[in-house]
Amino acid sequence: RAVDLVAKKAAAKTVIDTEISKCTEQQQQLGAQLVHRVREFQETGLLRDYALLLQNQRDLVQEHLGCSNQSTNTENVQALQQAVYELSQQLEIVKRSLAQIKDKVDWAYVMLEVEPDATMEDVNRAYLQSDRDEEIEAAFVILKEHLQFG
């Protein structure tokens, strides 16, 4: 009987060691996945925030440009126009990077230049004021479905 007990304990220890090994391996895999997803989330958030910053800067400079068009200082007007152009170019680059993001709803908010807490009314207004190219059309459809069914 003592031999049987020792054999049973050894078999149980082997099973437990195997389970511990499997759990440890799974824990490491899940940890690596978590780190990857956190980095992906941070990158997406930073890009979205940067896009919104560029958007706000561009809008501010455009507003200032609208007020400056009444003045006769063409040098300042040209500098403001150049700033709007450069900010628009930078915004397009960031938007292209965001287009590769898996979360299409985040992408759509940026493309339509609305905040993530925007209402359907905000989305419609942004859509009507946009250039309505293919990307804007796709973003509008995504947000419309998201706000209706999400």
Image (tube, helix red, strand yellow):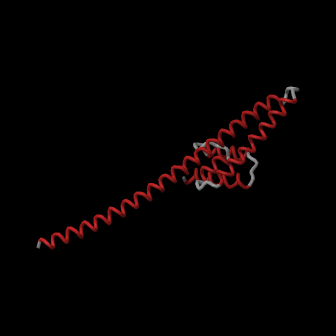
Residue 52 location (% of width, % of height):
65, 41
| Residue in front for this viewpoint, 47 or 130 | 47
Image quadrant for the N terminus?
bottom left
Residue 116 image-quadrant placement: top right
Between 110 and 149, the one lying in front of the other is: 110
Closest to the observer: 22 or 71?
A: 22
Residue drawn 64% across the image and 55% down it: 100
| Residue for point 72% across, 46% down | 128
* Residue 70 % position (x, y): 85, 28
Position in image of residue 130 (x %, y %): 74, 46
Residue 60, compared with residue 18, is above or below; it is above
Location of residue 49 by image quarter:
top right
- Which of the 4 quarters of the picture holds residue 71? top right
Residue in view at x 44 percent, y 54 percent: 31
Residue 44: image location, x then y, percent: 59, 48
User: Against 37, is 57 above or below?
Assistant: above
